[in-house]
Amino acid sequence: MITVENLTKSFPGKGEHVLALDGVSLSVPAGTVCGVVGPSGAGKSTLARCVALLERPDRGSIRVEGVDLVALRGRELRDARRRIGVVPQGDSLLRQRTAAGNVALPLESAGVAAPARRARVAELLDLVGLTNKAGSYPDQLSGGQRQRVAVARALAASPSVLLADEPTSALDPETTGSVLAVLDRVRSELGVTVLVVTHDMAVVRRICDDVAVLEGGRVVEHGKVLDLLTQPGSRITASLLPEVDQAGTTPREIGQYDVVAEVVLVGFAAVGALLPEAAHRHDVELAILGGGLTRLGETPVARFKIGINGERSERALSWLAERDAVIRRAPRDIGGLAA
């Protein structure tokens, strides 16, 4: 588990210090994947570097498995850092070493004997799906393969925490999928706690259990991804859910319906059955005016704009809300809902 409390970090600037982190607090449960998102300059990478103690914060505490890393010095700090694997942003492999040689580097530094080292390297290359690339040099690998080698190298010392800074930056969608699949395996098969810094919301959709939103060095939203969908005014929800198509929903067309609303449905049963069942139970006409489906991890999620006609239109909408659908009414004086 990672617990960050009141973390502050500043850097020298022209005339005054630049505050990169301003009282950041968050917790990441053991064995989960937490995404850290936010605009450029929000402090995401600084937070990751502080958690790894690559940067020492000005104030605050960073606890990994209950141990405050900020209070450690010397050998105790070096030992604690071995429990934290780091996948740096960009291509970080040594060009003169093969894939296997790059993965072995932390083990060599730790003085692990050659037989044990070779066995561990083979195990990790198998985990990331690159056993057949053990003898290849970085320039012979694709960008996604190099990133997977970097993940294997970060896992060499069997850390309990893995920090990945923009692990899918500049990768195409297919290659991104292969890297995210590896990070998901790290969590599910090894039980490693993963903190992912990213600007790509596809990363959050695919593998994150929790998400923290940083703005101006502060955490402005933090929680379980699925829980945030039900919170009014959530900053992250609009970025995670399908856009609602505005076509065909002018004020005149919206006026044709007794009720117009945006509905968010979570889970297999909800996405597949709730809307038609509401129409059938309450004998109303229900039309989907826009929206679509996505997945958050393995959970299907839908966001639709719906129009309902019939005497029991309001009751149908209430029935959906009683079954955990998230309802947002459409204003009657403008065309559609803000996506």
Image: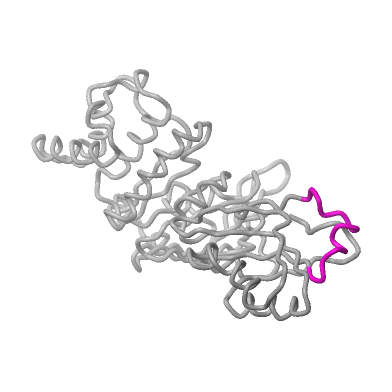
Residue stretch in magenta = 246-259
The quadrant the C terminus occupies is bottom right
94 displayed left or right of 24 = left
Closer to us: 133 or 230: 230
Q: Residue at x 47, y 32 (%)?
A: 90
Image position, residue 104 (x, y; %): 23, 34
Q: Residue at x 49, y 61 (%)?
A: 210
Q: Is residue 270 magenta?
A: no
Closer to us: 203 or 58: 203
Closer to us: 18 or 245: 245
Q: Is residue 248 magenta?
A: yes
Q: Is residue 52 above or below residue 72?
A: above
Helix, strand or loop for the magenta stretch, by majority: loop
Q: Residue at x 40, y 64 (%)?
A: 63
Closer to us: 213 or 63: 213
Residue at the outermost left position: 115
Image position, residue 139 (x, y; %): 37, 18
Q: Residue at x 21, y 42 (%)?
A: 110
Q: How many marks?
A: 0
The quadrant the N terminus occupies is bottom left
286 displayed left or right of 161 = right
Image position, residue 286 (x, y; %): 70, 66
